[in-house]
Image (cartoon, rainbow, N blue to C red):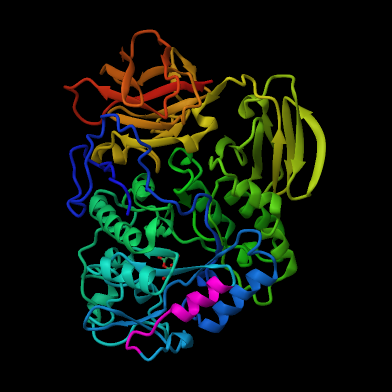
Amino acid sequence: MPRTRHIRAAIALSVTITAQPAMAQVAPLEPSGRFSVYPSRAAQTPPMGWNPWNAFRTDVDEAKVRASAQALVTTGLAAKGYTYVNIDDGWALKRLPDGRLRIRDSMFPSSKTGSDTGSFLPFTGFLHGLGLKAGLYTDIGRNTCAQRWDADSPNLPEGTIAERQVGSFGHAEQDMRTMFADWKFDYVKIDACGVADYTPADPPVTSGNYQAFAPMIVRGDIPKSDPRAVEALYATLGEAAHRFGGDAATLSICAWGEALSPIWGHVRGNLWRTSPDVEFTWKSMLGNFDSVVDGALYAGPGHWNDPDMLAVGHGDFDVHHLTEARSHVTMWAIAAAPLLLGFDLRNAPPVLLDLVGNTEMIAIDQDAAGNQGVPYRDGDAMTVVRTLSGTGQRAVALLNRGAQPVTARVTWAQLGFAPGSSATVRDVWARADREPATDTITATLPAHGSVLLRLAGTPADPSTTFLDEMPARVNIAADGLTPETALAMGKFPARIATAPDGTPLVAAGKAFAHGIGLFANSRIELRAGGDFRRFVAIPVVLGSKRPVRFRVYADRKLVREVSVTPTQPPQPIDANVAGAKIVELVAVAASGGTGRPPMIGWGNAALRR
Ligand code: GAL
């Protein structure tokens, strides 16, 4: 059973989620003394494995899945970490009158056990016997995505309208019990078409074959969506998944970045999609990468941004496009993204197995500190820096997003290395050491090309760690969002060295190289873990006349409070947080203003040893 849970209101600060009566509620701006992400032992590193969807869509069967599972083992990929085998849409035949789900046994013959539902136990037993883990699929609504988007599939649920309602709406308890307690799955992916694509105007409904569902998600339209209702459905399923699967059960939220899911996903699940399904084109893959790349403050052990499964092996990422395939994997690894393979492993080209099996790439993706990389943009050239565990350890991706060659670079300032110091350089894809480097590394990249490097260098100031060098230790516990502010921001309202509207964090005309920008009426939790003595920052109010009070708490004790107005010169904060497990940063706007709270920044925020 999860411990008492903190509720972070996604939209209005005063909101409570009625579907969660058991949860204790903490006023959003009060210090919690906790790191209030989804309480979980699962997915401490981004999940890795295989899912049949990109290879087979609903044309999947047990033989294909078992052979793929076997292939994960024989190719050595399982030993390298690819352990989840996740069945996707298409497995459910119908919902029985008593609400239980019946498995399509023509697709999964081993499920024929004589009972009217069938059982996945033989199948999950097979996977567990191989040392693998098992995942299954459902939807927060009454119906799934294939029923809407793969309407010609022969593998759609059968029977009456009610029998074809195989989504988990109204069946959270029962379905999670069946999947985790009875069938022994380890992972559930929960889709959301059931609350998006069955409006009275949608073909499934107009055809008379499906019950209408007043949409909670209108794609691309936050005001017409109901983020709180969507969040509450996931919360209910997450609670039930924990009840029946324990806190090692993995919950994958698949709401495609809609309904503000990227900003509440970390409280409700282990991973959450941030974008539409990846298509097998360079443009689509880049779009999905871009949907996570500014979200480092939201990810960390047990909670990950999910730009979707890998498209490797298909279209622009097949054996004829190894440059693109490598760049795609480079981006996912530097972003601490889940690595879920989606190509047919039964006769897979060795060159692709070699690519996704590169252990140095995997070690970066799976680095225990869980810091997602932080981007720097220069036209088509992009640099992403990821702080790895171990002093001075960094991963760097240099990327060419465009079709013309570019020169990309990373500087010692971006890496936090001492000027003039030398760093060792490992080229991950070449599997070779390069000459040690000083101050800058540049690379000329062909169209869509990339370089993935692991560096070991000398930190500029070993006693000081900027929060952006350890985003996994940061939790945006309250983000000051209101319906108006939700519209005035990008995907992630809290950003590294950037205001929520994408402009730089500035004070007295000077941009901060480090820090966190977000809205006032916000609270940040830092997992300091007793490792630090002081918290330092320069608090700023951006583009508003309203004064803001900045508070620093160490294990719930107020240790510093300052009031900042936009006109006064920046005053640094230096607060004693010695030994604190949790440091919290609260910014409260003076009352009286209307509309959105001011944008604020914790400029150059750092913890000192
Ligand atoms: C989509 C989902 C895909 C796949 C598909 C199944 O909504 O994003 O990953 O699960 O549904 O129908």
- Residue 224's spot in the image, x, y percent? 24, 53
In the rendered image, which quarter is residue 63 located in?
bottom right
Q: Residue at x 21, y 71 (%)?
A: 212
In the shown orientation, is residue 50 left or right of residue 543?
right
Q: Can you tell me which quadrant of the image ligand 1 is in?
A: bottom left
- Residue 313's spot in the image, x, y percent? 63, 67
Q: Is residue 515 magenta?
A: no
Q: Is residue 117 magenta?
A: yes
Whether residue 448 is visible? no
Quadrant where the C terminus sits is top right
Q: Residue at x 34, y 37 (%)?
A: 477
Residue range of the region highlighted in magenta in the rendering: 115-129
Q: Is residue 515 above or below residue 168?
A: above
Q: Residue at x 44, y 78 (%)?
A: 121
From this viewpoint, which residue is outermost toward the right? 435
Q: Between residues 142 and 259, which one lies in front from this camera angle?
A: 142
Q: Main secondary structure of the magenta part?
A: helix
Q: Is residue 592 above or below residue 469?
A: above
Quadrant where the N terminus sits is bottom left
In the shown orientation, is residue 466 left or right of residue 518?
right
Whether residue 244 is visible? yes
Q: Residue at x 57, y 78 (%)?
A: 66
- Residue 535's spot in the image, x, y percent? 45, 19
